[in-house]
Amino acid sequence: MKHARLLNYCINILNDFNKKVDGVEQHLSSFIKQNKILDRGEEQFITEVFSGSVQHAKVMNVVTEGFFRSDGWNSLKSDKNLYTVLCYLSLYRLDELGMANYRKFIRTQDVNKMFKFLSFFLNENNLHSWIKDEWCKIYEHTYVQVNLISPIQRWLPELKELIIQLQDKIDNKLKAKSPKTVTELSPFKLTKPRPRSVPVPEKIPTVSKPKDVPKSTYKLPSEQKLIQEARERNRRRTEEQLLGATKSQFKCASKEKSDKTKIRMQNVIADQESKLMFEGSKARPLPTNTADNIPIKLNMATILREGALYQKREQDVIKKLSLLEAGAKDGSEFQMWQDEMRQKDLEKELSEIERRRLEGKLSHEEAILARQSLIQDNRQKVLKMKEEAEEMMQEYVARRLDEEKVLRELVEDVLAGHQNAKEAKQKLQNYKRKIAEEVSEESRGLLRQAFEEAAQDMRRKIDLVQEIRAMEAAPKNNRKFIDWTSTAGHALLSEMSIAELKERLCLMKAKQLEEEENKRDTILEAKEAKEQMLMEKLEQISRHRIAEGQLASKKQVEKQKKPEKAKSVDPKLKALQDKLEQKKLERLQTAEQNKIKPTKESAAVTSSLNKQKRIQEDSRWRELEQRRERQAALQAEGVLTNVSGQKLSSFSQRSRSAGKLAC
C-alpha cells in the first residue's frame, strides 16, 4: 500500500466533488473508473475516507477554518482538503490505522505544513476550549466526549512525539546514536607485592619569626605632599591676581576699538568707496506710457468663451422680446422692488454687525473691571500666604538643624568602618589578578590555534580561486553564422525570414507616409475654417462691447442724478454706545484708585538706592582708569599684558616657587 498515492486519491476526489450536482456513490464510482483503481484494499480505503469526510464535513470545517483564521493565515486555501483528510484520519480512523501507518501518511507531505497543522490541531488548549464548544453545537456533549475527544486523548502522547520529530527535522537535528559497548578489561591475577615499610618522619626545623615590613614602605614621603600643597596655593594666588588684573584694566589702554567707533569707520569707508565707483551699473529708466488703452491679445479659448457668452445673451434677449410680444409683463418694477428690499436687508445686517461689535467692547470692559477686582483679592491672599510661609520656614530651619546633627553622628560611625573595608578590598584585588593571569594564558593558546586554522582555510581558498581563473582563461569559440533568408523554424503561421521582414517594413513605411500627407491636408482645411469662425466671433464681440460701454455710461449719469438718502441711527445702537462710554469711565476711575502711590518711606529708600548705585559706578570707573594706567606702563617697559602673557608669567612664577620648595 503506497501511502502518498492513497492520500493524493483522497484529496483529488474531494476536490472534484460538488454536492449540489453529484451524489456520493455516483461520484465515487466515476472517480474509481476514471483513475483505474483495481486494488480492492485501496478502493475500500478511498471509499471509507471519502464517505466519512462528506458525512462529518461540519466537524472537519470547524478545525480547518479555525486553522486558517489563526495559525494558517499564510497557508494555501487549496490545501484545505489535505487538512480535512488528515483530520478525519486522526479523529475516526487512528485506531484502525495504527501509529506506524499514520506516521507514513504524514511524512509523504511537506514537513512545515504538517508541523504547523498538527501543532495547532493537537494543542490541548484548543481541543478542550473552543473546538470542543463548536463540536457541541453540531452533536451532543456525550457523543463529542466519547467519540471525538477521548480517542484523540489516548493517542496524544504518540502524536506529540511525532510533532517533536517534525520540529527536529525542520531544525536539522540528528538523532542521537546509541553508544557502542566497550570491551571491559579484566586485570591479571598476579602475586601482590609486600607493602613497603613506612619511613620515620624527619624533624622539621623551626625558623625564627621575621620582622614586619615597616609601614613607611607603603606611604608616600611627606615632602611630596608639601610640594603639592605649595603648588596649589601658588596656582590659586596667581589665578586671583590674573582675575583682579583683568577686571581692573584701563579702557584707554585697550587696543580694540568700541562697536560705535567701528560702525563710524565702516560708514566713512563706505562713503569714500561710493565716490570712487566710476563705472557702476546704472538703473534703467521707467518706460513712458504711450497710450491709455493698450490692446489686449486674445487667444482662441477666450474668443470662443466670450463669443458663446454674447451668443447666449442674444438668445435670452430674443426670447424675452418674443414673450413680451405674446403678452408677458415686464419685470423692471419687480427688479426695483427687489433692489430696495436687498438694500434694507443690507442696512439691517450692518446694524446687527455694529450691535455685536459694541456688545463685544462692552463685555471687554466688564472683563477688565472683573480682572481688577480679582487682582485686588489676589493681593490680599498673597500677603496672607507670605505670613504663613515665614512661619513654615522657621519650623523648617529648626527641623533641618536636628537632621544635620543626626547625620553628623552617622558620618562619624561610617568613617570608623571604612578602615576595615580597605583591607578586604586589597585581598580581593590580589585574587582577581591571579585569575586574570590564568585566563590570559588560556586565551593566548586558543588565539594561536584560531590563527593556524584561518591560515589553512585561506590557503585552500587561494588554490580554489586559481583553479577557477585558469578555467575562465581557457579560449572559447562563440561565433555564430546567420542566414538572412531562412526562418527560425518555430512552425508558426506568421513566421518569416529577416529579408522578407525588411521588405514588409519598407512597404508599411511608404503607406504610412501617404496617410500622413492626407492627414496634413485635412488639418490645413480645418485650420482655415477655424480662423474664419474666429474672425466672425471677434466682430460680434466688438459690437457687444461698444453697446455695453454706452449702457454703462448711461447708468452712471442716472446714478449721479439720484439724491443720497440720510442715514438713520438705530436707538438700540445709541443706547449701547452710551453704556460703553459709562463702563470705560468706570474702569478708568477704578484703575486710578488701584494705582500704587509712593509714600515718604518708599521715596527715601529709592533715593538711597540711586545714591549707592552712583557711588558704585564712580568707584568702578576709577578702578578701570587705574588698571589701564598700570597696563600702559607695563607695555612701555615691554611686559606682556594680554591674558595669554599673564598666564605664561603666572606659570613661570609657579614653577620657580615649586623648584624652591623642592630644593
Image (tube, helix red, strand yellow):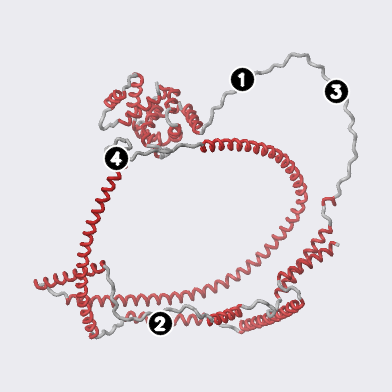
Q: Earlier in the sequence, mark 1 or mark 2?
A: 1
Three-letter code, disc 1:
Thr
Camera-nearest label, 1 or 2: 1
- Gap in angstroms between the C-alphas marked 2 and 4: 103 Å
Q: Amino acid at mark 2?
A: Glu
Front: mark 2 or 3: 3
Read off the residue under disc 4.
Answer: 496
Name the disc covering residue 581, or none: 2
Residue of label 1: 181
Q: Earlier in the sequence, mark 3 or mark 1?
A: 1
Mark nearer the N terminus (4 vs 3): 3
Residue 142 appears in the rendering: no
Q: Quadrant of the N terminus?
A: top left
Disc 3 vs disc 1: which is toward the camera? Answer: 1
Determine the image quadrant of residue 650.
bottom right
Residue marked by disc 3: 198
Q: Considering the numbered disc 3 on the image, is that residue within a helix, a strand or a loop? A: loop
Helix, strand or loop at disc 4? loop
Residue 207 vs residue 598, the one in the foreground: 207
Mark 4 or 3, which is nearer the eye?
Answer: 4
Q: Is residue 91 toward the left or the right of residue 564 in the image?
A: right
- Quarter that holds the C terminus: bottom right
Mark closest to the chain's N terminus, 2 or 4 = 4
Q: In the displayed structure, would residue 124 be above or below residue 636? A: above
**Category of crowding for the residue at label 1, using alpha-carbon neighbours closer than 10 angstroms: few (below 14), some (14–19), many (at least 20):** few
Residue type, numbered disc 3: Val
Q: Rate crowding at label 3 as few (under 14), some (14 to 19) or many (20 or more) other CA atoms within 10 Å.
A: few
> Could you say whether the residue bearing mark 1 is in a helix, strand or loop?
loop
